[in-house]
Amino acid sequence: MSSSLPGWKELPMGGVAFRPSTDIKTGEWRLGFRPVVKEEKCVGCAMCVVLCPDMAMGLGEEGKAQVNYDYCKGCGICARECPYGAIEMVPE
Amino acid sequence: MARVEQRRIGMMGDEAVAYAIKQVEPDVVAAYPITPQTIIVERFSDYVADGLVRTEFVAIESEHSALSACVGAAAAGARAFTATASQGLALMWEILYIASSMRLPIVMVIVNRALSAPINIHCDHSDAMGARDSGWIQLFCENCQEAYDTAIQAWRIAEHPDVQLPVMVCLDGFVVSHTLEDIEVLPDEVVKEFVGERPLVRVMGHEGEVPYRLDPTGREPLSMGTFAMYDLYFEYKRQQEEAMRAALKVIEEVGREYGELTGRYYGLIDQYKLEDAEVAIVGLGSSMGTAKDAADELRDEGIRAGVLRIRSFRPFPTETVREALKGVKTVAVMDRALSFGGPAGPLMMDMATVFYGLKEGPTMLNYIYGLGGRDISTDDFKAVAQDALRAAEEGVEGLPVKFVGVRE
Amino acid sequence: MIEIRLHGRGGQGVWTAANLLALAAIREGKYAQGFPFFGPERLGAPVLAFARISDKPIRVHCMIYRPDVVGVLDPTLLSPSVVEGLKKDGILVLNSDKEPSELREILGLEEGMGTIWVLDASRMAIEILGREITNTAIMSAVARATGAVSLSSLEAVIKERFPPNVAEKNLELVRRAYEEVRRE
């Protein structure tokens, strides 16, 4: 068991979240494939942003889909759902 | 604090509770009526309808929802109150643990009533015993006055920074709830000053230190009762145990401060003529008043009897009980509930633990009584004390469990 | 301490009578309890209510088994069971149009056991209230027979607890009951 976890005296009470969940880079859990956006095909419809279960998709300054690889687990939902075929799953 | 002028009135236990809660004026009351708690909810909803309190009264569809609403309100930083009995408390079961584990200082009055089946509306302590290990503080009252007084003190105990736990104020169904007695009540402003505002402790949340409440604006973000596995869950439970131990001191402090104000001092236990007692009756609730009368009658007959009433059942005042019974040779432990298949009644199991491993301790016998409202008289208590003395003289082996007044 | 047991039928205000006696005593600075028989209340079924009045704080929390006083609100309940446990020097306050000697026979009361006070409370209640609600009349007769509380204290709690129109007629009833109850 990890000794870096707080003991009962330091832990805030009540099952409170004591550090942001964003501290954990869940992108490290990605297995094998990562989504890559083909900007020429992307129309910025944001379907992938809505459907990403890990809130790892956003729109960049150009209004095109952008992947935050810190939190992308590589599930591939974005690639499967993109109406324009603008996202491709490529081997890491 | 100086002693204040009080008004003497006649009230039933339920009315006395409703009156105390009116004076405390919590932010939220969510309750579902059930016999014999009904009068509390009726009277309080009258106060709301008459505009005498600003409390948000939630007439809710079940006890499970009533306590859930209180959890939500208390998590948002409000003072929340509910009351129930018997089946109602049973229906609340899963939320009981959530309220205590989320460290929400809710106050709930339990009007003790037997559990079905068969259906029974009368007093025993089975309902509260079912919630014994749920992490709530449990204070048992002897009479209407104590019900009133404890419904006020409970807030200070629950909200103390070292405690932060919900409190159950237990009073006996009908025997206290529906019995009109003379009580002394404090002026509204004195109650308001005594309970003050709910102080919010500060905790380290995921974005720094914040008050312990959910903030819908997101300016002071906090998540409570989140997910914890084997790596953290155990630590949270250890904290709850610590809070319970801290409550022992706080219950006494609050009881003393209340005593200075009213002349009625409260502690973890209530001792009656134990100093020179050869036999002590130990128990919870209203019947201990009857036991005190029995002790006096026994003393008139030459038997030195005393009574130890446990006011704080959870946390259990182990040291205080041990000290109070020092020198008492024979103890009759009265249980108004059964732990089916257990080694003895629930109170007896605690009492046996109090003296476990010591070189010296009293001879103890367990008496189960009063289930489903079976009345227990002064004569019954005298017979119990005499039976315990006789048994102790003849020699007791193991842990005898006897049933008072049950037909063979 | 004086312990009072009232017998009546569900819906006749037996519990109310016990509570009013307790409230009157509390008004006089005494200690008191008023409570129902801990049973299901059913309209018309025989029910009991109890009151304790004392100069010292009351700790006991069980029913009353050896009453000093028994009051009976309903004449149809008069039978040996109502005198069960009554102390030898106890007081009986009965709603009846019969003579004390006849009542002793009905109740199976031996000579020298208890003192009977009798009042035709049913007739009086019908005259004044227009209904056979005898709780306040018997309560008043109990006050007269025992001296446990004064008539003026009873009047005060009736004014406090009853709506004005109900209070007015009951005040008349308690005054007359207090006057007219007869000791054997």
Image (spheres, rainbow, N blue to C red):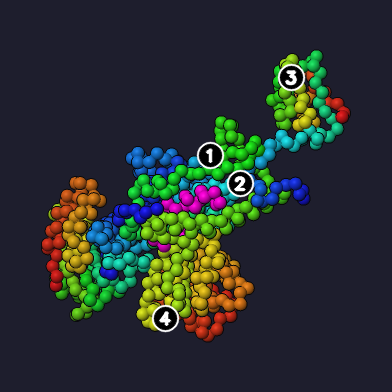
Q: Is residue B204 visible?
A: yes
Write the residue at 58% across / 42% down: B202
Label 3, residues with CA under 10 Å away: few <14, some 14-19, many ≥20: few
Residue C83, how many percent across, how many down?
Answer: 26, 72
Given the image, on which type of amino acid does mark 3 rest?
Gly
Evaluate whether label 3 is on the same chain as label 1. no
Residues at marks 2 and 4 touching, judged by CB atoms closer than 8 Å: no
Is residue A31 placed above or below B349 in the rendered structure? above
Given the image, on which type of amino acid does mark 2 rest?
Gly
Label 1, residues with CA under 10 Å away: few <14, some 14-19, many ≥20: some
Is residue C133 placed above or below B328 in the rendered structure? above
Evaluate whether label 3 is on the same chain as label 4. no
Q: Does the stretch in magenta take in B156?
A: yes
In front: B289, or C68?
B289
How far apart in space, not on screen, are marks 3 and 1 (Cα)?
37 Å
| Residue picked out by circle 3 | A60
In front: B273, or A66?
B273
How would you classify the magenta stretch by its main secondary structure? helix
Given the image, on which type of amino acid does mark 1 rest?
Ala
Badge number at residue B303: 4
Q: Secondary structure at mark 4?
A: loop
How far apart in space, not on screen, are marks 2 and 4 (Cα)?
51 Å
Subunit of label 3: A
Q: Earlier in the sequence, mark 2 or mark 3?
A: 2
Write the residue at 86% across / 32% down: A32
Badge number at residue B76: 1
**C69 sits left or right of B65 in the view:** left
